[in-house]
Amino acid sequence: MVRVRRAADGEGWELLHPKCAVERLDDVQEVQAMFEAGEFEVARDELRWLLGGCSDFIDAHRLLGEIALVDGDLPLARGHFGNAYQLAVQAIDRAGASPRQFPYRLASNRSFLESAKGLIHCLKQLDRDELAREIVKRALHCDPSDPLGLRGL
């Protein structure tokens, strides 16, 4: 289960990924290299295998969303980006309702915010603008500095 904690520097909060995801970080880096080399089918198979042993693996869902975008499958991309986004949002909500920032500068928050961006893109392409705006608002609440340019989407 994804959880949250205060960042070590005291400047914001960070996602704590489950042990199964942390143990698979080397694997996901290999998959990222496969993705960058255009080996989408092999990367897809590896990511599915990784998710089989760790369904709360935000990085794997994000990468599957990116592969689905390359394949032109917007509904599937939306599903994977949405899963990654929801895993993080649920962890944030479980931690309490008080405002918390999850800055992109912290590596553990990046896949969450990148997934939010991917989800926003998919929703806009699928004419779900109102839901896309809600996600922009939530993501900007998590990192008001907007390093991914969500305000412009």
Image (cartoon, rainbow, N blue to C red):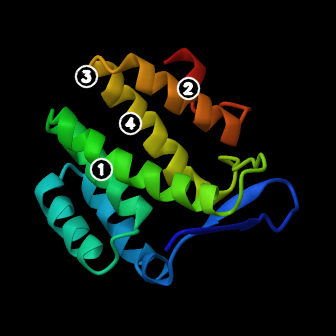
Gap between marks 1 and 4 measured at Cα: 8 Å
Three-letter amino acid code at disc 2?
Answer: Leu
As helix, strand or loop, the secondary structure at mark 2 comes to: helix
| Label 3 sits on residue | 126
- Please state which amino acid type lies under the numbered disc 4: Leu
Of 11 and 90, nearer the camera is 90
Q: Contact, CB < 8 Å: mark 3 with mark 4?
A: no
Mark 4 sits on what residue?
A: 119
- The residue that disc 1 covers is 80
Q: State the SS at label 3.
A: loop
Residue at mark 2 to residue at mark 1: CA–CA distance: 19 Å
Residue 52 appears left or right of 111: left
Which badge, 2 or 4, comes first in the chain's sequence? 4
- Vertical arrangement, residue 63 with respect to residue 52, above or below: above
Q: Residue 62: x percent and y percent?
A: 37, 52
Which numbered marker is on residue 150? 2
Which of pointers 2 and 3 lies earlier in the amino acid sequence? 3
Q: Residues within 10 Å of mark 4 (few under 14, many from 20)?
A: many
Q: Which residue is rendered at x = 29% and y = 16% of the image?
A: 127
> Disc 2 versus disc 4: distance between alpha carbons?
11 Å
Residue 88, percent across and down?
53, 56
Q: CA distance from mark 2 to mark 3?
A: 17 Å
Between discs 3 and 4, the one toward the N terminus: 4
Q: Secondary structure at mark 1?
A: helix
State whether residue 23 is above or below residue 94. below
Q: CA distance from mark 3 to mark 4?
A: 10 Å
- On the image, the x and y values in percent for residue 56 come to 40, 69
**Does residue 140 lie above or below 87 as drawn?**
above
Q: Is residue 105 left or right of residue 68?
A: right
